[in-house]
Image (tube, coloured by chain):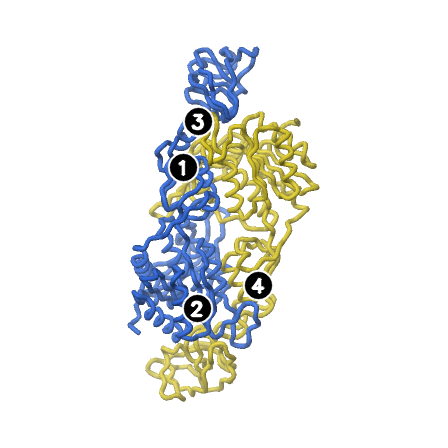
Chain colours: A yellow, B blue
Amino acid sequence: MKLLKVDTIDEARRKIADAVKEKGRKTVKKGILDAVGYVLAEDICCSEPVPAFRRSTVDGYAVRSLDTGGASENMPVFLKITGEVQMGCPAEMKLHAGECVYVPTGGMVPDGADAMVMVEFCELFSSEEAAVYKAVSCGAYVVQAGEDMKAGEAVLKRGRKIRPQEAGALAALGITGVQVYEPFCISIISTGDELVSPQEAPSPGQVRDINTYGLHALALKLNFRIQHETVLRDDRTLLKNTVKSFMPDSDIVVVSGGSSQGKKDVTASVIEEIASEGVFTHGLALKPGKPTITGYDEPSGTLLLGLPGHPAAAMMVFEILAGWLWRELTGEKEAFGITAVMSTNLPSAPGRQTCQLVKLKKEEDGQNVAVPVLGSSGLITILTKADGYVITGEHAEGLKKGEQVTVYLF
Amino acid sequence: MKLLKVDTIDEARRKIADAVKEKGRKTVKKGILDAVGYVLAEDICCSEPVPAFRRSTVDGYAVRSLDTGGASENMPVFLKITGEVQMGCPAEMKLHAGECVYVPTGGMVPDGADAMVMVEFCELFSSEEAAVYKAVSCGAYVVQAGEDMKAGEAVLKRGRKIRPQEAGALAALGITGVQVYEPFCISIISTGDELVSPQEAPSPGQVRDINTYGLHALALKLNFRIQHETVLRDDRTLLKNTVKSFMPDSDIVVVSGGSSQGKKDVTASVIEEIASEGVFTHGLALKPGKPTITGYDEPSGTLLLGLPGHPAAAMMVFEILAGWLWRELTGEKEAFGITAVMSTNLPSAPGRQTCQLVKLKKEEDGQNVAVPVLGSSGLITILTKADGYVITGEHAEGLKKGEQVTVYLF
């Protein structure tokens, strides 16, 4: 084995991004409803103005605003009713001075009119004449053609994660399918002579496999896909053959090993042997997360990721590396962190960044408070008790009570 | 038609919750990976301690801490090596005074030992004797049996939304399936003579249907299911028959009509006629969202929801009423709002609450700033530009620049 290459989070991220970047991400076409949760791989331009015509935002009369000048509750102006616009139909009339036309909400405002008066401010004297009790200014209660989206405008940019409202905007544009980035295909290998499946009753010394489940669910939450999944005994040849067999159709092969030195060495040496570019990072200067190993195989385009055996550490490092890499490749924005203040002093590990789990509480004054969730990273319950995590710098002396931090929900 | 029953958000919510509550939510059993995103309908208790045995958190030697008293870099203590624990196997030896046993990370700590010494602080003199260069205290580097979860402890409570870490915790407990609440079954009816599907080219006066897509995607985001979906011409009999045909297998039938008075009246009168409990709310004191109608049919257990035709208003009201009702029935916590300060003054509508869309920006000092996204609620792009929304009180005079607000991501 070569010497350990202990990296900071930034160094480890940079190395995997540099390796993987060249290949880029494949894209796939999805219908607009199926595309929700995916990340746009193209800019979406508006080919026609939305709305395509001037629409009324109220039930009322289309008027020339000049004609309503001086109208008030005591002093109406009288306009000649020359027609009524039907929903879904063009306004075929043209409005002249002294005229008005009834238009329902969402209906087309006829040419010649430049404003709407709400029906509440109008009174019919006959089917041919309306009294208008309010002066309106030009453009009142009218959505202009192109006010929602202008022709030629880049409405949604590459890297945008598609939410329900983006699906609505695409429908408005008449776009029924978009190019999105293909999710990472993840394969998960958990190793350990001590592991039994959740269905089994563990004998003394055995524990149930947590990581396969936690990492599987986390990968799905990040909108990745699971390609393969297996639990292996501790056996170097078995591990090597399994990783190799998963590489051709996986973007990332995750090996969640035990955290003992012997096991870490096996994972690192298998990655070093298999990956064309060898091991990039052997040890992350992060608490928890030290026994993290990364490597890259160029021919198959597979990132190999050795994660700590401790469940909380494994899930946090997966999010910090694989979640970040996804955003780096697709341009997706990081989720908005929640600003909070620390409830207590918290020392940090010297020379290492710390990924501290916290629970959030809202004080009566609206202030969010981050309360550290303490315990070994081998405990799964520290993750279930936490709302998110805070990352402190490697040179920080720790966090002080009352200090402002950004909490990333987890 | 009866008089309008204009309600505040709280009044409208309370009425639908009171009506729907009695029925309760059905539950369904899901495998732990399929259950992610669902809400637990039962408390999960731990039937056995996790871990079931004392585990080492390091590679090293199990010792009696008393034996290491006074050990230091210059003055080791010498202990007799009496064995080695294998991963996944019980520690069958018992440790006596002056003895130590090798245990890998995660391995079982033998009886008689009360602490671990990291291998880095030990030196082997022979296969039978180790020098220990560090004193450790009782419990050092040992996870106690039950430290993660105690037998009998309620680990996860009803109402908890299952995240990846909860799936991991369930795996650790040997639980492979849990009872979760069955999602709402939603049927969506969009009405309007002016509507054409996104595939079609609208003629003058016509617009593409946005609401069916936006509401469909939003319902899925809230982890609801879509039961039926259709677009109807404006026709009272057609609307009535369609709502009736959707009621037997829907929890909520949503009618997203136009916003014109005539259409609102039709939706309200259809709900009044069909629903055994009639119309609860006819008009929401919310900007935007006024043309909102709610009603309940007891025999079929269906909530009828008439939403504004404006896309942004329809989606916000759906989230505010249906999203809230789901949390009320299941005990799911509301997502943590982001604390921010307003970038500018913002007047509110007198006597009404305002649901104001905002974009979030992070200042250099870490402070989040909420910038209002302005425009008619008929525009879909105001939703795509927004990160979330702020709700102001009905009696508030508006929001002041620099005022602290809670932003709900959307």
* Residue B49 appears left or right of A4: left
Could you tell me which chain the residue with mark 2 belongs to? B
Mark 3, secondary structure of its residue? strand
Per the image, label 4 sits on a secondary structure element best described as: loop
**Quadrant where the N terminus of chain A lies?**
top right
Q: Chain of mark 3?
A: B
Tell me the mark number nearer the camera, choosing from 2 and 1: 2
Calculate the distance from the C-alpha at mark 2 to the C-alpha at mark 1: 49 Å
Q: Amino acid at mark 2?
A: Gly
Point out the tag, 1 or 4, that comes first from the N-terminus.
4
Residue at the spot of label 1: A401
- Left or right: B2, with B206 as reference point: left
For marks 2 and 3 on the same chain, the one whose residue lies earlier in the sequence? 3
Q: Amino acid at mark 1?
A: Lys
Q: Are marks 3 and 4 in contact (CB under 8 Å)?
A: no
**Residue for point 59% across, 68% down:** A151
> Residue tagged by mark 4?
A176
Relative to A17, residue A182 above or below: below
**Quick one: label 2, few (<14), some, or many (20+) residues within 10 Å?**
many
Judging from the image, mark 4 belongs to the subunit labelled A
The residues bearing labels 2 and 3 have C-alpha atoms spaced at a distance of 58 Å
Of the pair A224 and B178, the residue shown nearer to us: B178
User: Mark 1 against mark 3, which lies toward the viewer?
Assistant: 3
Specify the quadrant of the image occupied by residue A180.
Answer: bottom right
Badge 3: few (under 14), some or many (20 or more) residues near its Cα, within 10 Å? many
Q: Pointer 4: residues within 10 angstroms few (<14), some, or many (20+)?
A: some
Please name the residue that numbered disc 3 is placed on.
Answer: B143
Q: Which residue is mark 2?
A: B309
